[in-house]
Image (cartoon, rainbow, N blue to C red):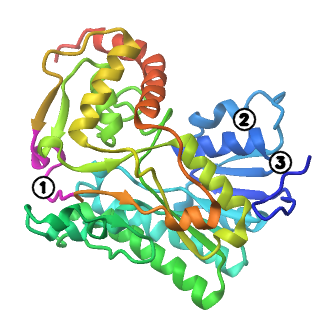
Amino acid sequence: MARVDLDGRAIAPMTICMIGAGGFIGSHLCEKLMAETPHKVLALDVYNDKIRHLLEPESLPWAGRIQFHRINIKHDSRLEGLIKMADLTINLAAICTPADYNTRPLDTIYSNFIDALPVVKYCSENNKRLIHFSTCEVYGKTIGSFLPKDSPLRQDPAYFVLKEDASPCIFGPIEKQRWSYACAKQLIERLIYAEGAENALEFTIVRPFNWIGPRMDFIPGIDGPSEGVPRVLACFSNALLRREQLKLVDGGQSQRTFIYIKDAIEAVLLMIENPERANGHIFNVGNPNNEVTVRQLAEMMTQIYSKVSGEAALDVPTVDVSSKEFYGEGYDDSDKRIPDMTIINRQLGWDPKTSLWDLLEATLTYQHKTYAEAIKKAMSRPVASS
């Protein structure tokens, strides 16, 4: 039976140029497209480790529908040709690790703004549709965070729920370089929006709110740099795998929402296949029901990892550290990030389903299975004397 869109029209097979296809989100989106659709993917990235299972062997049912192109979009003349070959371009490429925002601000700004400019330009000039991945960080701090600590208005959703078409984008001072990422992401959003207004670029902007699941981020020293600091959930996973205390930055009081990658990918597929409903829109993609403080997250993950691994938790599972000690000078943070879901629900009829407990259990089960042995081996190696 032919697949149909939300308005009952048959969905024609399309060619998708996916930039950053080898990353966490890209790998899950490629899996979904191969398993459930007839679409073809031109997968662009520097690495293909996370999608190798989709590329080999040639006997896979979707062989021929996914092609990997090893490309760094910073300086590759093939980029425009590949965008021209496709009906739709999805740009997932970014530096999106908070530890880098104030230690590598130039790389962060170049990666998230300068390097994205040619993609927008080629899509606009060649009349190609663009789905651009931004971030919930463009909202910055909530209005509520500027109210007195004891103000009852802090409990009023009007002061902290983030709406795509109404909430202001509030960043810290320039010396707080942590905002380099959010600022670069906001500026590319404004550029894309302007291309839509002035040159009729068909675009959709996605603002992810902490997408979680297998293959996210990296485990330092195993499938990422030893000195690297991934995002909070992978940081906690790494500590649990190594039987180390979970570090709570500034007491772990920041509040976050988390969504399971498979729920989020459902939303992206709806955007891909319903252009008339998605074009010209910015979409929050998160799960407001899965809100916790970072401290509560650490407690839940400790409990779930004990269940998954069969190992007792440490007597003192967490330790408080300052943001200066953990991230270095120039760090700042947003207090609370709760997505408003009105627009995506109205346009695409989408709602997330997976509970926080279930998504953490699925992720930690995968990480324990994938990394536990490698970490034990790495930790048991004798240290070379200098």
Q: Earlier in the sequence, mark 3 or mark 1?
A: 3
**Kind of element beneath mark 2:** helix
Number of other residues with Cα within 10 Å of mark 2, as a class: few under 14, some 14 to 19, many 20 or more: some
Assess whether residue 220 is covered by the magenta stretch.
no
Q: Which mark is residue 38?
A: 3
> Residue at left 57%, top 62%?
345
Number of other residues with Cα within 10 Å of mark 1, as a class: few under 14, some 14 to 19, many 20 or more: some
The amino acid marked with disc number 2 is Leu
Query: Residue 260 location in percent, x, y?
Result: 49, 41
Left or right: residue 148 compared with residue 200: left
Assess whether residue 327 is covered by the magenta stretch.
yes
Q: Which mark is residue 96?
A: none
Q: Residue 55 carries which label?
A: 2
The amino acid marked with disc number 1 is Glu
Query: Residue 330 location in percent, x, y?
Result: 15, 59
Report, in whole angstroms, how far the alpha carbon at label 2 lies from the one at label 3.
16 Å
> Residue at left 67%, top 53%?
269
Q: Which of marks 2 and 3 is nearer the N terminus?
A: 3
Q: Mark 1 points at which residue?
A: 329
**Image vertical order of residue 362 relative to residue 27, above or below:** above
Query: Residue 140 location in percent, x, y?
Result: 29, 66
> Residue at left 56%, top 63%?
344
Kindly check if marks 3 and 1 are in contact, taking CB atoms under 8 A apart as contact. Answer: no
Question: Can residue 129 be seen by looking at this rendering?
Answer: no
> Residue at left 72%, top 35%?
55
Question: Can residue 344 be seen by looking at this rendering?
Answer: yes
Number of other residues with Cα within 10 Å of mark 3, as a class: few under 14, some 14 to 19, many 20 or more: some
Query: Residue 1 location in percent, x, y?
Result: 92, 46
Q: What stretch is highlighted in magenta?
A: 321-333
